[in-house]
Image (tube, grey):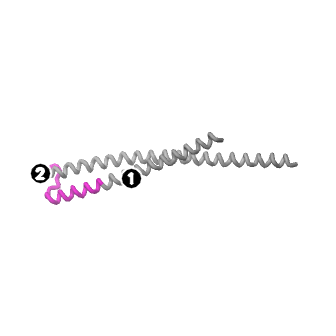
Amino acid sequence: MRSRETALRSKRFEVEEKARKVQGLEQMIRDFEQMASDLERQVRAEEDRTGIRDRSHFAYSTFAKAANQRHENLLASIAGLRAKLADAVREHDEVQAEVAASESADTIEADRSRRRADRLTGVSLR
């Protein structure tokens, strides 16, 4: 019984760890989205300032080029993080289901033990 409790405690810890990973990925995605939005605003402001919006124009702002590249890199990173987030959510749900199954198995086993003890107590009293 002790090893079962230890295994269940370990699984609960794993669920908490997976939940922290999911939260961390969600926060990173929000931060990257905010940075991408800020960069996009900066590019628009630079394009408005210079009056050149064509990226292939020879006089297009080097700051706007660099900010556009960084914006595209952030969008690619966000896409990768979303894929990792989907995997992390799936892993969290799987481990959580395992814990729920183990807890229900423990409850069933405890009920059986109680009934056995009640039957034995009832038999010995007669």
Q: Residues within 10 Å of mark 1 (few under 14, many from 20)?
A: few
Question: Is mark 2 in CB contact (under 8 Å) with mark 1?
Answer: no
Query: Mark 2: which secondary structure?
Result: loop
Exactly how many numbered labels are in the figure?
Answer: 2
Q: CA distance from mark 2 to mark 1?
A: 38 Å
Q: Amino acid at mark 1?
A: Gln
Q: Position of residue 75 (x, y in %)?
A: 31, 49
Circle number at residue 93: none
Q: Is residue 57 magenta?
A: yes
Q: Amino acid at mark 2?
A: Ala
Circle number at residue 27: 1
Q: Is residue 11 left or right of residue 52?
A: right
Residue mark closest to the camera, 2 vs 1: 1
Q: Residues within 10 Å of mark 2 (few under 14, many from 20)?
A: few
Q: Which residues are magenta?
A: 35-59
Q: Residue furthest right?
A: 126
Q: Position of residue 11 (x, y in %)?
A: 55, 44
Residue at 61%, 43% (x, y): give it. Answer: 5
Q: Position of residue 37 (x, y in %)?
A: 29, 56
- Name the one closer to the observer, 115 or 43: 115
Circle number at residue 59: 2
Q: Is residue 68 left or right of residue 18?
A: left
Residue at 14%, 51% (x, y): give it. Answer: 60
